[in-house]
Amino acid sequence: MNTLSLEAIRATLKAVGPYVRSTPTVPIPADLVPGARAVTAKYELLQITGTFKARGAMANALALDEQARAAGVTAVSAGNHAIATAYAAGQLGIDAKVVMTATAPTVRVERCRSYGAEVVLAPDVHAAFEMMAALVERENRTAIHPFEGLLTAAGTAGVGYEFIQDATDLDAVIVPIGGGGLAAGVATAVKLLAPECKVYGVEPEGADSMSRSLAAGSAQQLSRVDTVADSLGAPMALPISFSLCQQHLDDVVRVTDAELIRAMRVQHQHLGLAVEPACAATLAAATGPLAKRLVGKHVGLIFCGSNMDPESWFRLVETH
């Protein structure tokens, strides 16, 4: 069984501290989640690189020995993890060559390049993973995985750790799930600090690898990913992140693309946030499949990030 101690979480938080932000914990109007006693959001969208991914990428980069740093790193991503890996590598003087899907927004590709990384485009997410593996074999680069590994979970656990420190009376925390790296870390930290607090994961219906994995009792792969939330479009769950989610999540729910886009509109109208679909997932879950379970509760929502250009945001919310 994979485990992550509070000591390891604190040590990782201290190590990455000079390179990442402790993001704001913000009370938001309780009526955004009908029936809730209070609602507090963790604004991880204000993280360096625009998403929580900077925490895990930095934790992995810092752990590389001198030989690995000299050979360089690679990563695969729809954008956010690639940006985080490029940032982490740039901070430590490490060469980075990242693989992104051809559908990745131009703003994400350009942000990777702005941190000094070389970007290689793949036709789809399955091909992207194959191309990353080839870079590891051909160029001896270290792959910084987008969601798998205890180091990654120790990094993302900082989100949950900070949340519980800042909002001490949360009854429930909702966390988005793509591959499960964020949920693995957050759920572990929350349960270590506040065992009675419920932790719910949320994933898109068209990318529900964690729901399927929990039902099967082992990490599962998807043959197809179909969701507007490309940041949550991991094609599989993997053993370490799955194991931590299995141990510490109270439940995982699914939301539709329509529910994600509706939540994006609410965040813009009431909070002034123009966010990517992944960032709206927790609000979509709180007002949808989790609504009855949150009545009378102090609800914590993780707003995981937002790397989306205005044109893409407008096109998505106006055409769906």
Image (tube, grey):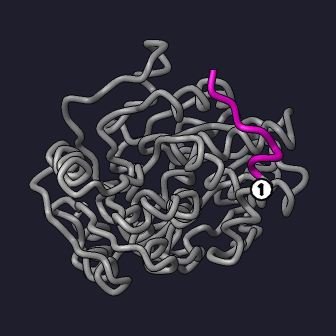
Element at badge 1? helix
Q: Amino acid at mark 1?
A: Ala
Q: In the image, what residue occupies the spot 59% across and 24% down?
A: 246
Residue 106 falls in image quadrant: bottom left
Q: Residue furthest bottom?
A: 114
Q: 63 or 99: nearer the eye? A: 63
Q: Residues within 10 Å of mark 1 (few under 14, many from 20)?
A: some
Q: Is residue 3 above or below residue 203?
A: above
Residue 256 is inside the magenta segment: no
Q: In the image, what residue occupies the spot 73% across and 47% down?
A: 35
Q: 310 or 214: nearer the eye? A: 214
Residue 7 is inside the magenta segment: yes
Tell me if 82 is positioned left or right of 290 in this view.
Answer: left
Instruction: Give residue 34's position: percent from left, percent from top.
Output: 67, 50
- The answer to whether residue 296 of the structure is visible from this angle is no
- Determine which residue is flagged by label 1: 11
- The answer to whether residue 90 of the structure is visible from this angle is yes
Instruction: Give residue 291's position: percent from left, percent from top.
Output: 63, 40
Q: Which residues are magenta?
A: 1-9
Q: Residue furthest left?
A: 123
Q: In the image, what residue occupies the spot 54% across and 44% down?
A: 285
Q: In the image, what residue occupies the spot 52% across and 48% down?
A: 176
Q: Is residue 193 above or below residue 167?
A: above
Q: Quadrant where the C terminus lies?
A: bottom left
